[in-house]
């Protein structure tokens, strides 16, 4: 067990102090936990379900033949540094994308059409290895229900410096205040940020939680933001966008 204060641990700096189970090995049976990674995409309520996280034992990178096996607790930055050093391609998108490999795979995280599943071969869960072909995945989502202990990826040369630079430029507009990344998924053929801006929500605040004035789709914490403020703002935005455009904005942030 470990005590985690989500007001410090989560990237949006909101949430309660909770007891978390730390998993040192692959569970023998599927206990009902909500697994967390680096909490960079989470909004944790004051009454969350039982939570667990992978221990440092799952923080590793191993090369095996033409593949690279990455533990579910391995931070994105560590993977990126490794791939730069060993001239491996396919992980450039991890630049300034906060999280650990389990959370990144579960969310199929990425930027535009570049996403972690592009390079994935299979995942390791309590049921052994599951090939990507047997997983339903799409834009910022997968149907993975079990804990991801490891991702197995293609190992290909060469690290793409131009792509890396491209991601670096895209990130320049990112707010520096604590946030949980994009709040809503982009609806088909549109941008959540554009819709929010048209509803005058760019920079709009409830309490200390607001939509960033740099990037309307980033929910940011101006200091003492609470879960209640965040949920009120999310509900308001969904209502306004629906009334104006008839579009249901779907949350990208995971509420637990
Ligand atoms: C400043 C900033 C910028 C960001 N930019 C981007 C971006 O460009 N693109 C993008 O896609 N995202 C972005 N994000 C969101 C975030 O980085 C990603 O969603 C990332 O995948 C979250 O990883 P995590 O380890 O923090 O997961 P968490 O936030 O802890 O969890 C996310 C989800 O994954 C599940 N999960 C966690 N670990 C596991 C596991 N081992 N097995 C199964 N399920 C698991 C959780 O239950 C939850 O449903 C950004 C966030 C911030 C704060």
Image (cartoon, grey):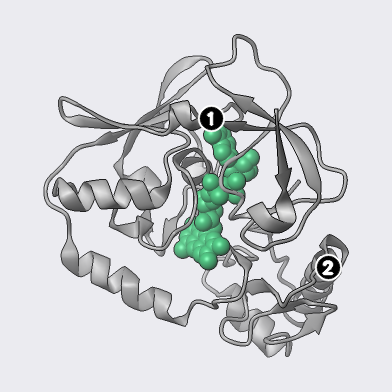
Q: Is residue 95 left or right of residue 4?
A: left
Residue 251 location in percent, x, y?
68, 59
Q: In front here: 61 or 253?
A: 61
Q: In front here: 78 or 50?
A: 78
Q: Residue at x 63, y 67 (%)?
A: 179
10 Å crowding of disc 1: few (<14), some (14-19), many (20+): some
Q: Secondary structure at mark 1?
A: loop
Q: Residue at x 69, y 87 (%)?
A: 203
Residue 50 location in percent, x, y?
78, 31
Q: Is residue 204 left or right of residue 99?
A: right
Q: Can see residue 143? A: no
Residue 201 location in percent, x, y?
73, 85
Q: Is residue 115 left or right of residue 9?
A: left
Q: Residue at x 38, y 44 (%)?
A: 117
**Viewer-nearest of discs 1 and 2:** 1
Q: In front here: 256 or 121?
A: 256
Location of mark 2 (residue): 235
Disc count in the image? 2
Location of mark 1 (residue): 55
Q: Secondary structure at mark 2?
A: helix
């Amino acid at each position: 067990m470990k005590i985690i204060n989500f007001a410090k641990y989560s990237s949006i700096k909101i949430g309660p102090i909770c007891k978390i189970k730390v998993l040192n090995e692959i569970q023998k049976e599927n206990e009902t936990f909500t697994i967390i990674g680096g909490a960079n995409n989470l909004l944790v309520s004051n009454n969350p379900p039982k939570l667990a996280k992978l221990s440092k034992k799952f923080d590793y990178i191993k090369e095996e033949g033409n593949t690279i096996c990455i533990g579910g607790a391995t931070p994105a930055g560590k993977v990126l540094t490794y791939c730069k050093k060993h001239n491996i391609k396919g992980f450039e998108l991890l630049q300034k994308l906060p999280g650990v490999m389990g959370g990144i795979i579960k969310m199929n995280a990425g930027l535009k059409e570049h996403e972690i599943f592009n390079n994935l071969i299979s995942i390791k869960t309590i049921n052994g290895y599951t090939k990507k072909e047997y997983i339903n995945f799409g834009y910022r989502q997968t149907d993975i229900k079990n804990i991801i202990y490891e991702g197995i990826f293609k190992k290909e040369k060469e690290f793409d410096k131009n792509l890396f630079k491209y991601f670096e430029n895209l990130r320049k507009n990112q707010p520096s205040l604590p946030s949980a990344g994009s709040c809503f998924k982009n609806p088909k053929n549109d941008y959540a940020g554009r819709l929010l801006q048209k509803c005058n929500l760019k920079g709009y605040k409830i309490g200390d939680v607001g939509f960033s004035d740099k990037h309307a789709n980033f929910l940011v914490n101006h200091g003492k933001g609470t879960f209640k403020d965040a949920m009120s703002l999310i509900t308001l935005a969904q209502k306004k966008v629906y009334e104006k455009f008839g579009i249901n904005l779907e949350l990208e942030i995971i509420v637990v």
